[in-house]
Amino acid sequence: MVEAIPSVLCDIRKVVHQERFLDLSVPQFQTLLFIKRHGDSSLSEVSKHLGPKLSSTSKLINGLVERNLIKRKTSQKDRRYVVISLTPKGKKVSNMVHKTIISSLTKKLSSLSDHECLSIIKSMQVLKQLFSNDTIRNE
């Protein structure tokens, strides 16, 4: 895992850079995909996912708001809480990014046998369950 995962992530980064979706950075794409996957999120949830300091996440979020890819809104449950969500344009871009990454990975994996693909799928399912990002919201 320690050797394989960085290589896979590097390949995904290359795909993102080649496509040049709106000249967004990889952390900006990661943010869009995180919000796409988890729905409305807080700044601290995004920051925990990305790993940088909260101040740099705030700057990243501001850039995405300026590009009309995400929006901030006050939580209906607690007015002190700000919720970050995708705009229609952000949904479109995140869907394009997701499809492009899936297409690239599919091409890479197409040379594998059915048995190898099944083995990888089962392994990924186990890893996803063990390392689920849902723990981000529970911390």
Image (tube, rainbow, N blue to C red):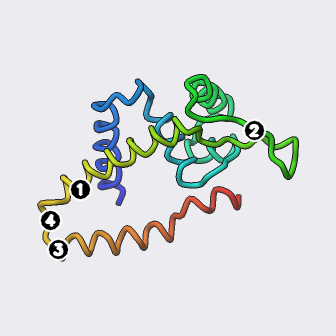
Residue at far front of view: 88
Query: Is label 1 or label 4 in front?
Result: 1
Percent coordinates x, y for residue 133 in the rendering: 56, 59
Q: Residue at x 30, y 50 (%)?
A: 8
What separation in Å lies between label 3 and label 1 (alpha carbons)?
13 Å
Task: Give the mark nearest the N terminus, 1 or 4.
Answer: 1
Q: Which residue is mark 3?
A: 114
Numbered mark located on residue 73 in the image: 2
Q: Is the Cβ of the residue at disc 3 closer than 8 Å to that at disc 1?
A: no
Quadrant of the rendering where the C terminus is positioned: bottom right
Asked if the residues shown at circle 2 and circle 1 are in contact, with their CB atoms under 8 angstroms apart, the answer is no
Q: Alpha-carbon neighbours of circle 3 within 10 Å: few (<14), some, or many (≥20)?
A: few
Quote the CA–CA distance across marks 2 and 3. 46 Å
State the residue at coordinates (68%, 57%).
Answer: 137
- 67 sits left or right of 43 in the view: left
**Residue type at numbered disc 3:** Asp
Q: Give the amino acid at mark 1.
A: Thr
Q: Which residue is mark 1?
A: 106
Q: Which residue is mark 4?
A: 112
Q: Amino acid at mark 4?
A: Leu
Q: Quarter-wise, where is residue 25 in the image?
A: top left
Circles 4 and 3: CB atoms closer than 8 Å = no
Question: Is 58 displayed left or right of 26 in the figure?
Answer: right
Say which amino acid is labelled 2: Lys
Q: Nearer the viewer, residue 1 or 118?
A: 118
How crowded pointer 1 is (Cα within 10 Å; few <14, some 14-19, many 20+) is rated as few
- Mark 3 lies on a secondary structure that is helix
Q: Which mark is residue 79?
A: none
* Residue at left offset 32%, top offset 70%: 121
Q: CA distance from mark 2 to mark 4?
A: 45 Å
The nearer-to-camera label among 2 and 4 is 2
